[in-house]
Image (cartoon, rainbow, N blue to C red):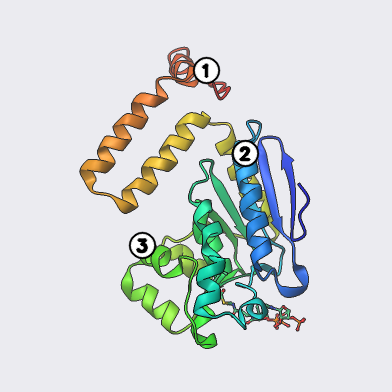
């Protein structure tokens, strides 16, 4: 798969996607978003990959959607080109996606991080939705995903004021998972990815599905799905291995079967 705006590689069972438009702070043009999504899907279907790591560079994870590309958009051109169809596909990825955020995660860049399951950020990382200063608003899920994470008061404050928020404050509001020294962001994200990649893959993906279901559904429906997924884990050899290993007082070795 050849890509213009991303670099990709694997380390053990971790598939890595690096956003690569360094001359424009990784501003996300539509082709770049398409490339990211297609690579996420590629890793999702690759049985030797268990976790996906998304990263930028030390200056920027991504400074938002490409403003130059949007300049001449109209409601009709947006409706017809349907740029958010690609974003919707991110939600369908079954494997864990971890974002390693250094530097800026603004606008669409913050939204991309919010589409990831876990986020490790550097202490100098800055998050924010500056769209209001461009006369627009978040469009790739920012108002919904941020509000679900922090509630209406903080979401309105941050988005209305186009606030630049330091990583620690974003962490304090439970939006991201870890803030670490800038130099070790990637290392820590990779450590987390490796830890997850050694867990039983079926359990990991069914947990992801059940946890996101809790955001959208009634408690009864969510409990039903959880129960079905719980039963499904008993179809795997990893369940037998995990429980046997406990009984035999040893570490389990999960094979993803
Ligand atoms: N789009 C296009 N180009 C950008 C963007 C961007 N979002 N961000 C930075 N660049 C470019 C700059 O124009 C500059 O290019 P050049 O060297 O050719 O002049 C280069 O990147 C470096 O930027 P700066 O010189 O400005 O570097 P600074 O370190 O001084 O500042 C900032 C970096 C703070 C990132 C600054 O460039 C900035 O404020 N950028 C805009 C941030 C922004 O407003 N983001 C929100 C965009 S709107 C959005 O994301 C909507 C999402 C919903 C739709 C998504 C689906 C399509």
Callout count:
3
From the image, tell me which residue sits under label 1.
250
What's the distance in space between the residues labelled 3 and 2, CA to CA? Answer: 28 Å
Which SS class for mark 3?
helix
Some atom of ligand 1 lies within 8 Å of the CB belonging to the residue at label 2: no
| Camera-side residue of 140 and 166 | 140
Q: Is residue 185 visible?
A: no
Q: Circle 3 is placed at which residue position?
A: 148
Residue 222 location, quadrant: top left
Q: Earlier in the sequence, mark 3 or mark 2?
A: 3
User: Circle 2 sits on which residue?
Assistant: 194
Q: Quadrant of residue 246?
A: top left
Instruction: Judge whether 148 appears above or below 135 on screen.
Output: above
Q: Residues within 10 Å of mark 1 (few under 14, many from 20)?
A: few
Callout in the foreground (3, 2): 3
In the image, residue 192 above or below residue 141: above
**Nearer the viewer's eye, disc 2 or disc 1?**
2
């Amino acid at each position: 798969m050849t890509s213009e705006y991303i670099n990709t590689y694997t380390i053990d069972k971790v598939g890595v996607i690096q956003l690569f438009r360094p001359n424009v702070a990784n501003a996300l043009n539509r082709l770049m978003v398409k490339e990211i999504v297609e690579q996420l899907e590629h890793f999702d279907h690759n049985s030797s990959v268990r976790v996906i790591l998304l990263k930028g560079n030390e200056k920027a994870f991504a400074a938002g959607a490409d403003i130059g590309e949007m300049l001449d958009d109209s409601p009709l051109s947006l409706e017809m080109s349907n740029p958010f169809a690609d974003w919707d596909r991110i939600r369908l990825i079954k494997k864990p996606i971890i974002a390693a955020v250094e530097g800026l995660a603004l606008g669409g860049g913050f939204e991309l991080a919010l589409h990831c399951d876990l986020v490790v950020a550097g202490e100098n990382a800055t998050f924010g939705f500056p769209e209001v200063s461009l006369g627009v608003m978040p469009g790739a899920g920012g108002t919904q995903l941020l509000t679900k994470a922090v509630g209406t008061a903080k979401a309105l404050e941050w988005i209305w004021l186009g606030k630049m928020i330091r990583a620690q404050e974003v962490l304090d509001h439970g939006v991201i998972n870890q803030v670490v020294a800038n130099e070790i962001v990637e290392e820590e994200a990779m450590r987390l990815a490796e830890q997850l990649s050694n867990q039983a893959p079926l359990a990991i993906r069914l947990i992801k599905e059940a946890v996101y279901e809790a955001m959208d559904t009634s408690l009864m429906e969510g409990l039903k799905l959880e129960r079905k997924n719980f039963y499904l884990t008993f179809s795997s050899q990893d369940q037998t291995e995990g429980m046997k290993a406990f009984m035999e007082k040893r570490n389990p070795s999960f094979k993803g079967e």
